[in-house]
Image (cartoon, rainbow, N blue to C red):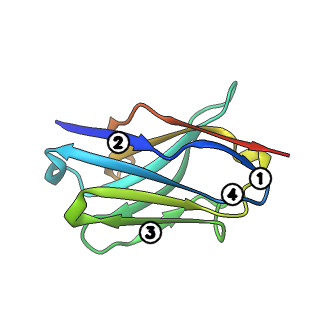
Amino acid sequence: QVQLVESGGGLVQAGGSLRLSCAASGRTFSTNSGAWFRQAPGKEREFVAAITWSSSSTYYADSVKGRFTISRDNAKNTVYLQMNSLKPEDTALYYCAAGRHSSGQYPYWGQGTQVTVSS
C-alpha cells in the first residue's frame, strides 16, 4: 500500500503563489507516477498535473499550463506543486495521487488540502 499526506494549502490573494507538498510512504515502487487533482464544490474531480518517477516527464491540464509546476524528489519520496499566478477559479481541494498516468489509474490518494484564492 501507499500512503500520501498533503500539506501547504491555505488562503492566498489572486496573483499570489503557493507550494503544495505530498509526502509518500509505503510501496511507492508499485506506482510509476505522482499526480495532483483538484475538486471544487459542485464539480467533478479534475486532473491538474502528473510526473513520472523515472524520467520526470510532466503533464499538465490546459487550465494550469504556464502557471503551475510539478516536481519530485525521489530521495525524499515527495511530490511538489508550485502554483503561481493563482486565480479564484483555482480554489478547490487539492489531492495528491499515485498510480499510472499512462492508463489513468490512480489507486492511492491523500486526504486533500484546501486552497482558497481570494479575488
Gap in Å between the C-alphas at discs 4 and 2? 21 Å
Q: Amino acid at mark 3?
A: Thr
Q: Residue furthest right?
A: 119
- Confirm whether residue 102 shows in the render: no
- Confirm whether residue 75 shows in the render: yes
The label on residue 58 is 3
Task: Give SS at disc 3.
Answer: strand
Q: Whole-percent x and y of residue 37?
A: 51, 44
Task: Give SS at disc 1.
Answer: loop
Please state, as top left, top right, bottom left or bottom right, where the N terminus lies in the image.
Answer: top left
- Residue where numbered disc 4 is placed: 63
Neighbour tally class for label 3: few under 14, some 14-19, many 20 plus, Cα within 10 Å: some
Task: Give SS at disc 4.
Answer: loop
Q: Whole-percent x and y of residue 43?
A: 67, 30
- Residue where numbered disc 2 is placed: 106
63 sits left or right of 51 in the view = right
- Residue where numbered disc 1 is placed: 87
Whether the residues at callouts 3 and 1 have beta carbons within 8 Å, the answer is no
Q: Whole-percent x and y of residue 3?
A: 25, 37
Identify the residue shown where x is 65% and y is 61%: 62
